[in-house]
Image (spheres, grey):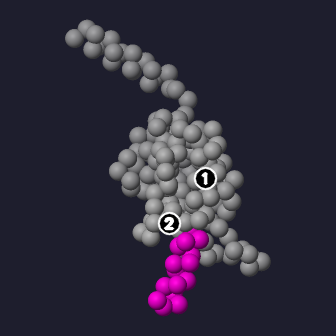
Amino acid sequence: MSTWQCKYMTTFLQCSQLASELYDEMKNDPDFRDVMPRTLEKGPFGEPNYCFHLHLPMSKVSDVCELSLSYVPDMVQRTDNNGNRLHLCETALMDCDGNVVFNEDLGYDDLRRFDTMDKVKEEVLRVMRLVQGPVDASDEKEEKEEKEEKKES
């Protein structure tokens, strides 16, 4: 195995470990109970994957079904101005087919990056609040009218 391959594998395993720690911290938090996957999928060598998706079951945003959380190798190698390694987590909105989607109303005209687990958890809660949104009275009225039409037919 080349030096580059060893370095990449070490970084990949570090990303997997960070994702596993975030997953474990979030799965025990009642705020995330309804969105967490049951298990963290395994990577190609049986290690925890560096990415997992949170299901957004109450999403009122038609093209947003999941939020992806990833510790990707090129982001983990970044350092701050003092040379301290940053552990950056990327978040992305996903549609129901697993494709990345962008939505400026949700603040996602690109992927977003966070340098602490607390900031990632704050972002997940922010997205959950936004996609669940307040119930729109006009939506309720339309649903009621549709039900009445079905009864009449």
Specify the label residue 24 is tagged with.
1
* C-alpha gap between disc 1 and disc 2: 14 Å
Is 17 situated left or right of 51 in this image?
Answer: right
Is 55 situated left or right of 85 in this image?
Answer: left
Residue type indicated by callout 1: Asp
Quarter assignment of residue 14 = bottom right
The residue labelled by disc 2 is 47
Q: What secondary structure predominates along the stretch shown in magenta?
A: helix
Is residue 11 in the magenta section? yes
- 87 over 21 or under it: above or below: below
Of helix, strand and loop, which one carries label 2?
loop
- 121 over 83 or under it: above or below: above
Mark 1, Cα crowd under 10 Å, few <14 / some 14-19 / many 20+, is few
Nearest the viewer among 6 and 84 is 6
Quarter assignment of residue 31 = top right
Which stretch did the figure color magenta?
1-15
Of helix, strand and loop, which one carries label 1?
helix
Nearest the viewer among 63 and 54 is 54
Residue type indicated by callout 2: Glu
* Residue in view at x 43 percent, y 18 percent: 141
Residue 146: image x %, image y %?
33, 18
